[in-house]
Amino acid sequence: MAEVKLAAQIRTEFGKGAARRTRRANLVPGVIYGHGAEPVHVTLPGHDLMMALKTANVLIGLDIEGKDALVIPKAVQRNPLKGDIEHVDLLTVKRGEKVNVEIAVHVEGDLAPGGNLLEYVQNTLLVEAEATHIPESVTVSVAGLDAGASIHAKDIELPKGVSLAGDEDAVVLQVLAAQAEEPAAEGAEEGAEA
């Protein structure tokens, strides 16, 4: 995974009014946590941060007024109407350190014929990976699966260096049988008799 470089500045003003002024200047308030250190309050460039966060679990190299920090997003708060980023929590990581993150599950292949439906029980999978080598997603083949089949977390092949961090027996995907439709004629006859 490529590292995205961003410049950050230490934030000294706090509260609702200060946060609004920061956002009007196209900056995003944020907090950096991790490794037992005191939280560091920063402001980040809004557009650059938005572009970086388009990649799930992005590794961000911050230049905080001359000091370097390596972080991953922990929580992102967005405006419910506009979708703008209002605040971001970042977690400090070190090269070689293992972190627990959720990665997207994608499917490939076609189910067995018969109109069966594929249900995503989980859209993501909790894994442990090195902070600098977090995969964006895993791909699972559902080719030929028939109704009643399911894929558990332990059945998914993970990239090298990545291990499962969640429940290995959790169902991730399952195939449901197509629902039979009741004939409309029966309903019409019942209504006519009443």
Image: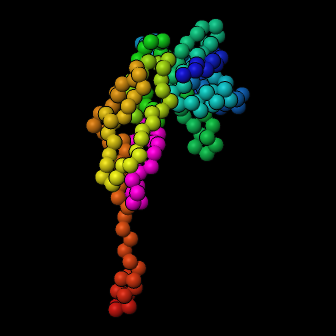
Looking at the image, which residue is at 36% across and 68% down? 180
Viewport quadrant of the C terminus: bottom left
Of 64 and 184, the residue lying toward us:
184
Which contiguous range is marked in magenta?
A: 106-124
Report the coloring of the rendering: rainbow
Determine if residue 164 is in view. Answer: yes
Determine if residue 19 is in view. Answer: no
Q: Say left or right for 64 vs 182.
A: right
Looking at the image, which residue is at 32% across and 39% down? 152
* Residue 169 in the image: above or below residue 183: above
Q: Does the magenta stretch include residue 118?
A: yes
**Image coordinates for residue 140, horizontal then vertical, percent:** 42, 38
Q: Say left or right for 153 vs 159.
A: left
Given the current orientation, which residue lies at the most extreme bottom position? Answer: 193
Looking at the image, which residue is at 61% across and 27% down? 52
Looking at the image, which residue is at 33% across and 54% down? 147
**Image coordinates for residue 43, horizontal then vertical, percent:** 63, 22
Of 48 and 155, the residue lying toward us:
155
Q: Say left or right for 65 vs 59.
A: right
* Residue 171 in the image: above or below residue 147: above
* Residue 48 in the image: above or below residue 182: above
Q: Quadrant of residue 69?
A: top right
- Figure disc tally: 0
Q: In which quarter of the image is residue 25?
A: top right
* Residue 113 in the image: above or below residue 100: below
Q: Does the magenta stretch include residue 117?
A: yes
Given the current orientation, which residue lies at the most extreme left position? Answer: 169
Q: Say left or right for 49 vs 108.
A: right
**Image coordinates for residue 150, horizontal then vertical, percent:** 32, 46
Given the current orientation, which residue lies at the most extreme top position? Answer: 66
**Image coordinates for residue 154, horizontal then vertical, percent:** 31, 33
